[in-house]
Structures are given as structure tokens and as C-alpha cells.
Image: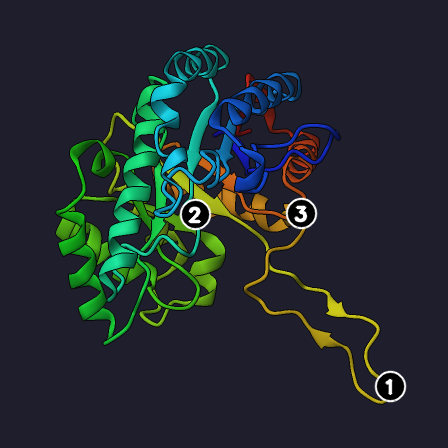
């Protein structure tokens, strides 16, 4: 089991994740690649072998009004091949998770078409690096306008407009407000797409009362036997907002909010129950605000409990 984190390295200053400059300053994929090289070196030193690249790794690459940024992948073909070779050498599993504006099942044609463009670019980015099917693009179903059934139908129709390479990279994830795990599993049955299970999202939205263990097992079963599935894990914020206004009690945080670290007591119980009964290995993306610090801290706590860590993977006791 790999443990990974998303986007930003926080344990060591000086490792920006990508070129985030405004378009007026001429950002470029070449700078993002240089920053990824530096970050990969630090991942190797920390022995972390799973990482989610930022959504904006190709700056303005699909901005409809900035065509000067539309050919960065072709301009950086050799640099992408080089960084891809290093990713494979270091055995780092990369993924991407487009943000809230990539809505494949939008009721608006322009938003849907832009989402298709985004997904095609994300897939091309991984292809240009020569990465295998473990490098996936994770997407939420999106809009529930006109109801869930209509939203699933729109997603399926839009999916047919994706090219083969983008569809092969795409995996779907349930969320904490609109589409439950059971609904995403139904979409998987209709489309053949793989499902990423998210522990906190399932806690927040589960009207079908599907047990966490059954939901995890069902999501893992959507992945071919020769592929290692991917799971998202986070702990909810349990602190209250301080200081509270005079005369009022402290306000609890929204349960949907991610905490800085992962609860190690819960994680160990999860390893001993749902993970043990799942019947197959998988990798875990920690969605924690402390990023790589959360990985390092959880790793230390698990090792203290007798679990081993070797070449970026947790070896269960």
C-alpha cells in the first residue's frame, strides 16, 4: 500500500508544485516540469512514492481565449519524456484530480465541451510521459441538475465524446453532496469506468446505507485484476471555531472539511477491518491539509504499531 499526498510539499520549503504565474507573465509547462523534477528528488529522499499533480500543471493549456498556451505539450515533448522516465525509475505513482470547473455532465454545452478538452489534455500529459494505466485522472460525476438520473445520463452521453486515451485514464469518484458511492457504482456498471472510493465522502453522503466495507469492496472490484486500485482517505475536522463571539458557544466545523492529519487510531481499525476483508491491495491518497507531513506522521505512527515501510509502501503487520 502506497501512501501519497496532493499537490503541495510542505515539509520542506522551496518546492513549488507548478508554474502558477498569471498569463501576463508568460507561464509555461517547461517551468512546471522543472519544478516537478525538484519535487521528485525530495519525494525520493522522503521515500514517498505516490503524488497527485496540480490541476494547473499546464498553465492555461485549455483556456479558450489564450491560444498562445494551447501547444505546450508539443513544445515540451522531450522534457515530458525525460520526466516520465524519472517517474518510472523512482516508482512514483502519479495522478490528477481536475477541479470543480471540470463538469463533464454539465447542462451547458460550453462547460461540457471545456471539460472534454481538459480531460483530453490531462490524459495526453500522462501519455507523453509514458506512464501506465496506474496514472489516472479522477473526476466527480458533477451536476445533479434535473435530478440524479438525468445527471448520470448526461455523463454517459458526454463520455462517448471522449477519445480512447482520455477514457482509459478516467476514473470516477463519489462526493459529499450530490452523488453517493452507490450511484457512482451504478454509473460504473453502465460505463465500465473504475471507481475511487473516498472514506470521508461516504460518511457524509450515503443515503443507501451501504456499509463502508461493502462500498470499498465494490469500488475495488471495478478495477481490473492486473491494476492496483486507488482510494482516498481523510479525517474530518473535529475542532471548533475559536474564539467564539461573546455569549455564544464555539461553532463546530463542517464535517466535510478535511483535517490537517489522519486519525491514526481510526486508520489502524480500518486496516484491521475493511482493508483486511477487501481481499486485494490498493494505494491510498491522503487528502489532508498537512500534505506530505500527514504522510510522514501517519507512517511514523503505523511503524510504532509494528507495521513496516519499504520502498514507499506500507507493509501490514
Q: Is residue 95 left or right of residue 242?
A: left
Image quarter for residue 170? top left
- Give the mark, 3 or 2, whose residue is nearer the N terminus: 3
Query: Quick one: SS at disc 3?
Result: loop
* Callout 3 crowding tier (Cα within 10 Å): few <14, some 14–19, many ≥20: many
Q: Which mark is residue 261?
A: 3
The residue where tag 1 is placed is 246
Q: What whole-number distance in Å separates the C-alpha atoms at marks 3 and 1?
A: 30 Å
Query: How far apart in space, not on screen, are marks 1 and 2 (Cα)?
Result: 44 Å
Residue under the point 30% across and 47% down: 219
Residue closest to the far right: 246
Left or right, 184 with respect to 79, comes to left
User: Mark number for residue 274?
Assistant: 2
**Which numbered disc flags the more N-terminal residue, 1 or 2?**
1
Instruction: Please give the name of the residue rendered at 22% of the width and 34% of the height, measured from the top-left corner.
Output: 168
SS of the residue under disc 1: loop
Q: How is the image coloured?
A: rainbow
Amino acid at each position: 500500500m502506497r501512501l501519497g499526498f496532493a499537490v503541495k510539499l510542505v515539509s520542506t520549503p522551496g518546492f513549488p508544485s507548478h508554474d502558477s504565474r498569471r498569463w501576463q507573465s508568460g507561464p509555461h509547462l517547461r517551468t512546471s516540469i522543472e519544478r516537478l523534477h525538484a519535487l521528485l528528488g525530495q519525494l525520493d529522499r522522503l521515500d514517498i512514492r505516490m503524488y497527485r499533480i496540480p490541476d494547473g500543471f499546464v498553465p492555461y493549456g485549455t483556456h479558450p481565449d489564450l491560444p498562445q498556451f494551447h501547444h505546450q505539450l508539443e513544445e515540451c515533448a522531450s522534457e515530458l519524456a525525460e520526466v516520465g522516465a524519472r517517474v518510472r525509475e523512482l516508482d512514483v505513482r502519479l495522478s490528477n484530480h481536475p477541479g470543480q470547473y471540470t463538469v463533464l455532465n454539465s447542462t451547458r454545452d460550453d462547460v461540457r465541451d471545456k471539460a472534454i478538452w481538459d480531460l483530453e489534455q490531462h490524459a495526453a500529459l500522462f501519455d507523453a510521459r509514458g506512464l501506465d494505466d496506474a496514472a489516472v485522472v479522477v473526476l466527480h460525476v458533477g451536476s445533479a441538475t434535473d435530478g440524479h438520473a438525468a445527471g448520470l445520463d448526461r455523463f454517459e452521453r458526454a463520455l462517448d465524446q471522449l477519445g480512447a486515451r482520455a477514457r482509459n485514464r478516467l476514473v470516477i469518484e463519489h462526493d459529499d453532496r450530490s452523488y453517493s458511492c452507490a450511484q457512482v457504482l451504478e454509473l460504473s456498471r453502465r460505463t465500465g469506468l473504475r471507481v475511487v472510493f473516498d472514506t470521508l465522502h461516504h460518511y457524509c453522503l450515503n443515503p443507501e446505507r451501504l456499509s463502508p466495507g461493502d462500498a470499498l469492496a465494490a469500488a475495488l472490484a471495478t478495477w481490473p485484476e492486473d491494476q492496483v486500485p486507488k482510494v482516498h482517505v481523510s479525517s474530518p475536522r473535529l475542532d471548533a471555531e475559536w474564539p467564539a463571539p461573546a455569549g455564544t458557544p464555539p461553532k463546530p466545523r463542517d464535517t466535510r472539511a478535511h483535517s490537517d492529519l489522519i486519525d491514526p487510531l481510526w486508520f489502524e481499525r480500518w486496516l484491521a477491518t475493511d482493508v483486511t476483508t477487501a481481499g486485494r491491495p490498493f494505494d491510498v491518497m491522503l487528502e489532508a491539509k498537512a500534505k506530505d507531513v500527514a504522510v510522514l506522521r501517519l507512517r511514523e505512527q503505523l511503524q510504532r504499531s509494528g507495521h513496516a515501510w519499504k520502498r514507499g509502501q506500507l507493509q501490514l503487520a
